[in-house]
Image (cartoon, grey):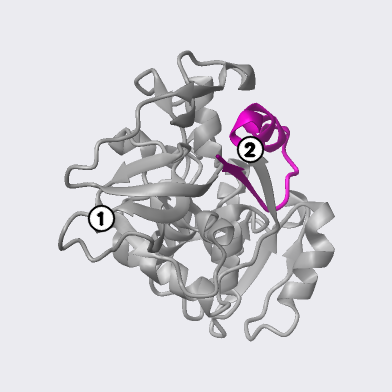
Amino acid sequence: MRAVGLTRTGGPEVLEVLDLPEPEAADALVIETAAAAVNPVDLATRSGLIPTSLPAVLGWDLAGTVAHAPAGCGFRTGDRVLAMTAQLGTGVGSMAEYVAFDPGFVAHVPDGMKLEEAAALPLAGVTATQLLRRTPGRAGQRILLIGAQGGVGAHLAARLLDESSTRTDLLVRPADLPAWQERRAGRPGEGAVLTDPAQVETGAYDIVIDAGGVPALFDAVRPQGAFLTITPFSAPDPAARPEVACTLIGVELDRDDLVSVAEAAARGIAPRQELTVLPFEDAAEAHRRLERGGFRGKLLLVP
């Protein structure tokens, strides 16, 4: 089978379409991949910023159809499914024609949802779900969300803007201002859409959620407030402000969270992102596009 992977780290040019044996079925669920999403973690793994064993198949997200289902696993051959394989922790990359994975962390794709749409959901949606779980007591709080235009940020914004008891300000790229002003309009909660970190008031927020990697806005949190980030390589130094609770959020495999993300998307609660679909052979180009910055929507690779 074909898979997108690497035998050495470096720039996008190190990516290859590898010829690998199909995975053994055994007790694993085997998924025939329809699409796999490209995420920033893939870029960091490919560059060597995040170490991984080599050779490696990249990818954390996928959607496809069941090719083999072990008895009693809750799935049947032909079922449409999505999964987050968490490649760095499990060693299972999603960018392959066939992926064998633990059925306990796989979910059904809702009826009416395209497999390409489902493939864009797992990592971003589950990360947002788990981050919000770590930020209780949002009622009556003033919140700043940095990077609402990104994959995780879009999921967070969709949830936060529906919380009428909070005031959530969004910090987005200038080019994304019209789109986010439109999304902001008509939502129950109050808040503004900002495009420049200089517009952010120092010490004005109870909670700052950084999904875009702007550690300088650590100062935007009031004393005794909370700063949460999903960007480990651009996180602030907690020692700089010990009076602020600073938390780095790492995503964990959780089937219930995956199911809730898929169901929310089916109900129209999760954001609908523009999808750019490229073949496995264009994996290097997908990495270049994401690395250049300013990319909108979600990049998918298909076999």
Q: Which residues are magenta?
A: 279-303
Disc 2 to disc 1: CB gap under 8 Å: no
Q: Is residue 141 visible?
A: no
- Residue sitting at x 79%, y 66%: 179
* Camera-nearest label, 2 or 1: 1
- Dot 1 falls on a residue whose secondary structure is loop
Residue in front for this viewpoint, 112 or 288: 112
In the rendered image, residue 197, in percent from the top left (x then y), is placed at 72, 50
| Residue on which the image places disc 1 | 69
In this picture, residue 67 sits left or right of residue 112 = left
User: Where residue 194 sits in the image (x, y, percent)?
Assistant: 76, 61
Q: Residue at x 34, y 20 (%)?
A: 53
Circle 1 crowding by C-alpha within 10 Å: few under 14, some 14–19, many from 20:
many
Up-down: is 296 above or below 222? above
What x and y, as percent, mark residue 199?
76, 56
**Mark 1 belongs to which amino acid?**
Ala
Quadrant holding the C terminus: top right
CA distance separating discs 2 and 1? 27 Å
Q: Quadrant of residue 189?
A: bottom right
User: Which label is found at residue 279?
Assistant: 2
Residue 31 visible from this viewpoint: yes
Q: Is residue 298 magenta?
A: yes
Q: Amino acid at mark 2?
A: Pro
Q: Is residue 31 magenta?
A: no
Residue at screen point 52% across, 54% down: 119
Q: Residue furthest top?
A: 8
User: Would residue 35 appear left or right of 91 to someone viewing this image?
Assistant: right
Residue 289 screen position, x and y as percent: 71, 35
Mark 2 or mark 1: name the one nearer the start of the chain.
Answer: 1
- Residue 20, relative to residue 298: is it above or below? above
Secondary structure found at label 2: strand
